[in-house]
Amino acid sequence: MEESGDRTQLAPQTEQMLRRKNTYKKIRTVVQIVVIVAAVLYGVYLLIPRPKPQPELKSGSLAGPGGLISEAAGSNRFIAISYPGLTESKRIDSKIVNYETFRQQIEALKASGYVTISQEDIIDYYMSYGSLPEKALFLIFEDGVRNTTTLAQSVLEENGYKATASTYANNMGEKNSSYITGSTLRSLSRSAVWETGSNGYRLSYINVFDRYGNYFGHLNANVFLKVYKYLWRDYNHYLMDYKRDKDRLREESDEQLTARIREDYRLMEEAYKNSPGFVPGLYILMHSNTGAFGTTSLASNTNRDSLTSMFSMNFNRQGTALNTLDSSIYDLSRLQVQSYFSTNHLLMRIWDDTGDRMAFYTGDKEEAERWYADVGVAEYANDRILLTSQPRGEGLITLKNQLFSDLDMTVTLQGNLLGIQSIYLRTDRNLQQGIQVSSEDNEIVVRELGMTPKEIFRKNLFEFDGGPFVSLQEDEYNGLVALQEALIQFETDPIRADEAKVELARLRTIQPKTLAMGGAPYYPTVDLSDRGNRKIRIRLVGSRLSIWVDDRVMVEQLLVSTNPMGSLALGSGVFMTQEQISQRFIYDDVYDAVFVNPEIRDAENPNVLLYTYARAQQQTINRTIQRWFQNVVDFFIDNF
């Protein structure tokens, strides 16, 4: 290598090699840029809203005790449906309704012929015996979360629907940006889509006891949410009763109760008049459901006098949708949609209340044609079959034109724990033969079918997971600790907050009896809304049955006596052997069994696929790219 002036002279071969290397670098850089740009553009394309295909809806009736239910006639009634909130989250344990499910439900109500009515229509109906549309629907959105009205707006507009947005008066201040404030309420009241209502002044609870009978006292909403998992329906909304002490004796006189409730209405009226400048016409008395307006006569009378003087109507009950002239305009009922309601679940509940013909949602028509719809209704979408039972009954679908002997089946069950999700093997259309493998009230149960089904196996899934994990004494102790911690964080009374600090310090010195120390085992009670998510594998060869749950062996080589071949069916059922009630939702007598990605293979040759309902490959690719693109966006947001 020689130098000439300031330039380094390279050997011809070396210089040629460097030029080639630099060229490769440039080409690689250009290719990388093209790939990134293409990926970004495709990601943007996936995120651009596009017209969605109309849902496949089927009009029809359900077979009831007397045969087909005919179209209900007349306009002497209306139904009321309410949503506690909407979210874009697709988490199955969400407590409020997914936006896409809401959209589908509204489209199905529209397809069923329902027309929304206004508050003025209801007033005219009761006060002047006015007429209503053939299928009148009143829609409510409760709890005043701002994002709910934002998400609902376009869906309502697209379907020509109107609704009432209800709020808590103590959220009218502008500082509560996640809730509908006074200025937002004024804006909604000027919209053709929205009317306004009130859920009350604030959400608060009195006379709260935990599941062990410990007195938790009177709690605001924030404290209540922190300790809710330690409770069991032993509490009151704060307008329903006298305040009581740990012995359930009254802490206040009749005069104090009356003054407290009236003061709450005064504060509510004052808050609304300050901002937005008016009191809504509709009221929802929280957690009444008593047949009156409170759990004691004095509370009921005081609520009645206050709400009838301030509001034009009151929704006093939840659990049923139907309202008729036999009801009072101050004792109306609404069906509050829960996060686990499928579209067909909602329609089934309305059908049970009204007998109306409903446009039940089918989804994937091609897949639906592969199944006999024996009982209830089924939705087929992407990789899941959602089977909705009849009220207080069952749902059943049977795979057409295919008989099975030995098989190896996998499926994920995502229905609520308190219900029945069944897989019937080597069976017939009447379920008079074969094997039933089911998830029931968080247990796996196996039965041999016949005139009298015979149970041959049962295993509690809580125990299968290794439970009990704590003793009753530990669970009770954990609830008391959680209460003090919540009071320290959220209690507005400084004296009570200080008392909680002292009590927490005392609790920290106590060691509750553990399982190892001989404590009694704690088994959680399954609630109506508890969600499930279990991967089930069933292998049936000859007279031997094996089951895996979440890839762990539950039972191997269980002896079964059954016919050598038969159909495959899926079932859903309402679990009716215990009280079907929850403080939050009262009751539910319809059940959704959810079968995700069912797949059946030959037991001896796993490469032979006998049946599957899986997400299309292109859909899987699109979802993967969407997730990747979102990760890229999040990275740039976080780092630049």
Image (cartoon, rainbow, N blue to C red):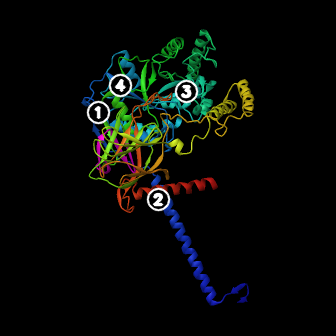
Question: Identity of the amino acid at label 4?
Answer: Phe
Which residue was labeled with disc 3? 168
Determine the CA span between mark 4 and mark 1: 15 Å
Q: Are marks 4 and 3 in contact (CB under 8 Å)?
A: no
Taking the magenta stretch, the answer to whether it contains residue 298 is no
Q: Secondary structure at mark 1?
A: loop
In the picture, residue 161 is in which quadrant? top left
Mark 4 or mark 1: which comes first in sequence? Answer: 4
Q: Are marks 3 and 1 in contact (CB under 8 Å)?
A: no
Which residue was labeled with disc 2? 42
Q: Secondary structure at mark 4?
A: strand
Determine the CA span between mark 3 and mark 1: 36 Å
Q: Nearer the viewer, residue 21 or 221?
A: 221
Specify start and end residues of the magenta stretch as a single range: 366-386
Question: Identity of the amino acid at label 1?
Answer: Arg
Majority secondary structure in the magenta region = strand
**Number of the front mark, 2 or 1:** 1
**Number of the front mark, 3 or 1:** 1
Which residue was labeled with disc 1? 357
**Number of the front mark, 4 or 1:** 1
Which residue was labeled with disc 4? 78
Q: Is residue 244 above or below residue 519?
A: above
Q: Nearer the viewer, residue 470 or 74?
A: 470
Q: Secondary structure at mark 3?
A: strand
Badge 4: how crowded within 10 Å, few (<14), some, or many (20+)?
A: many
Determine the CA span between mark 2 and mark 4: 47 Å
